[in-house]
Image (spheres, grey):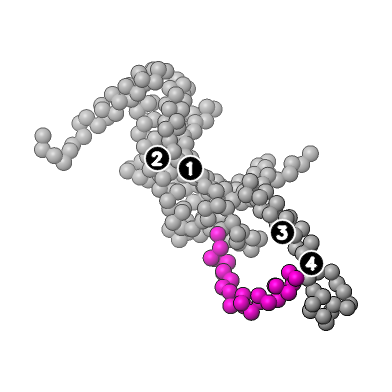
Amino acid sequence: MSQLPKISVWQKIKQLLTKQSTENNDTAKPQASSDAASDKSAQPESVQNEESQQPQNANRHVPNDDELPFFDRVSSDATPITDFIKGYFEQKQWHYTYYAPRDSDSQQSHHLSLRMKNKDIDCGYLFRVQEQNHFLAVYGILPFLIPESHQSAAMLLITQINYDMIIGNLEMDINDGEVRYKNAIDIEALGLDEDIIESLLQSVVAMTTVSFEIFSDLINTPSPSNDLPTLLEELRQEAQSRTFFLPTEFVQ
């Protein structure tokens, strides 16, 4: 049995408002009458008021399409989110790989992947787009996997980090130990332009870089503890051993 496509809460609200507006317009239409065709007094009062106000509203500014919020100008002829992101990448001259939606994907998600380096840390980044729901998610994927012997400690660490995180979250695939940071936006409510893409991507790059350092220390810790205070102390010691001999700019 085929499933009906899922719609967002805002789309449901828009459908409800559109339905109510149509019903109100149908009830407000004046009834046709041959006697009242030339007699203005026979028209309903609402129609008379509307006609009397036409000269006052003749010069009213009608907003252009680009002046409306994004969710008010989403239409069949609007630029798809995926094409907008492709154009952004091409303008930056970034090399990327595009993956079309799979037939088995009920959400019909588009994927665009690329690699970026920050602080000499090379990680993969994935843009996931759901055109129908107007969702955009960006993932920063660590270039190494968490071994099975360290996954319990990694899950404990991810849970604690996510608890205090305001924006985005860390995820781990327990099938292979892949760790990634994700941040997402609702384009229907927020809109989409180059500044929004840059802000979203910068936040993901920054958190992915921090996550790289944390989980690198974790996999370099032999037999990490499953007790959180002990685990945090082990990671602190690993970080100190990694940075203790780094040169500083100050005379000691």
Magenta span: chief secondary structure? helix
Q: Secondary structure at mark 1?
A: strand
Label 2, label 4: how far apart the Cα atoms are: 57 Å
Q: Which residue is mark 4?
A: 29
Q: Are marks 1 and 3 in contact (CB under 8 Å)?
A: no
Residue at image location 73% in from the left, 55% down from the top: 19
Question: Which mark sits nearer the N-terminus, 4 or 1?
Answer: 4
Nearer the observer, 48 or 232: 48
Q: Residues within 10 Å of mark 3 (few under 14, many from 20)?
A: few
Which is nearer the N-term, disc 4 or disc 3? 3
Work out whether mark 2 precedes mark 1 in sequence or the reverse, and give the earlier one.
1
In the picture as drawn, the residue positioned furthest to the bottom comes out as: 38
**Label 2 neighbourhood size at 10 Å, few (<14), some (14-19), many (20+)?**
some
Q: Give me the C-alpha separation between circle 4 and circle 1.
A: 48 Å
Q: Kindly report the distance in space between the C-alpha atoms of the residues bearing marks 2 and 1.
A: 10 Å
Residue behind mark 2:
207
Q: Give the number of the mark in front: 4 or 3.
A: 4
* Badge nearest the viewer, 2 or 4: 4
